[in-house]
Amino acid sequence: MHRHLVSLLVVVSVLVIGLAAQAGVPLAFGFGVTVPATIPIDWSASFSSITTEILTDPNLTLLFTLGTYPAHFPDMFEGSTNAIVKSWLGPFAVYAGGGLDFLWRPIGGVWGWTPYINLTAGTQIWLIDSVALVAGVSTREPLPPTWNFSPRVSLGLRFSLTPARPPALGKENAFYFWVIVGLLVAALLTYYPHS
């Protein structure tokens, strides 16, 4: 059963990426590893994922992630969908946003899922127009949220089928930078009283 589910998830992911590319939707795909922000690194709690980023606008993208925890494979999977705001400075993009996470695992002999909300921020360094190094920080909260900050850090690569790095942007790019600053300040104000 587990192998069939994994195979189905991989096939569906490849089909979605292929169909989106065929339809001309600008997107990027890649992979990454996320670990809890502790020293020494707790590799038993690592999360390996594949990502698809729909580049709807140079400053607004939709990010979809699907992955597993290798220590619990094939008994635990996680998927997320996020709205991301970006600000660009040449080949560098800083981003912030959030969305929903779903954790799937066997519960009492059947597969059950648990919803979470997540917040994420980070940077993308587009080495060339279609390849980026991505580093970020995220946190995940159960619903209803308890606002206990438990950061996770991630590192990955992203590949774009079309040039993802926009041409020089004007003053509107500064607006998105301040939107990102506002999102980060709001997150700090939310978490600080509870930490």
Image (cartoon, rainbow, N blue to C red):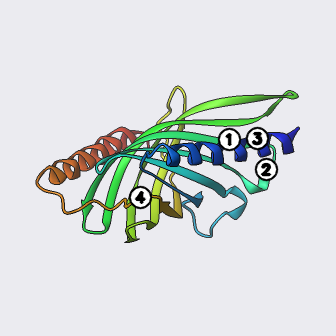
Q: Secondary structure at mark 3?
A: helix
Asked if labels 1 and 3 touch by Cβ distance under 8 angstroms, the answer is yes
- In this view of the protein, which residue sits in the foreground, 168 or 189? 168
Hey, what amino acid is under mark 4? Answer: Thr
Q: Secondary structure at mark 1?
A: helix
Q: CA distance from mark 2 to mark 4?
A: 35 Å
Q: Residue at x 44, y 46 (%)?
A: 24
Rendering coords of residue 46 (x, y %): 66, 58
- In this view of the protein, which residue sits in the foreground, 30 or 130? 130
Hey, what amino acid is under mark 2? Answer: His
- In this view of the protein, which residue sits in the foreground, 69 or 169? 169
Q: Residue at x 64, y 44 (%)?
A: 15
Specify the label residue 72 is tagged with.
2
Rendering coords of residue 111 (x, y %): 79, 30
Q: Is residue 170 above or below residue 190?
A: below
Q: CA distance from mark 4 to mark 1?
A: 22 Å
Asked if labels 4 and 2 touch by Cβ distance under 8 angstroms, the answer is no
Q: Secondary structure at mark 2?
A: helix
Residue that badge 3 annotates = 8
Q: CA distance from mark 2 to mark 3?
A: 18 Å
Label 2 vs 4, first from the N-terminus: 2
Judge the density around disc 3: few (<14), some (14-19), many (≥20) Cα neighbours within 10 Å. Answer: few
Residue that badge 1 annotates = 12
Asked if labels 3 and 4 touch by Cβ distance under 8 angstroms, the answer is no
Judge the density around disc 1: few (<14), some (14-19), many (≥20) Cα neighbours within 10 Å. Answer: few
Rendering coords of residue 109 (x, y %): 88, 28
Give the position of the N terminus as an image quadrant: top right
Q: CA distance from mark 3 to mark 1?
A: 6 Å
Q: CA distance from mark 4 to mark 3?
A: 27 Å
Give the position of the C terminus as an image quadrant: top left
Residue that badge 4 annotates = 162
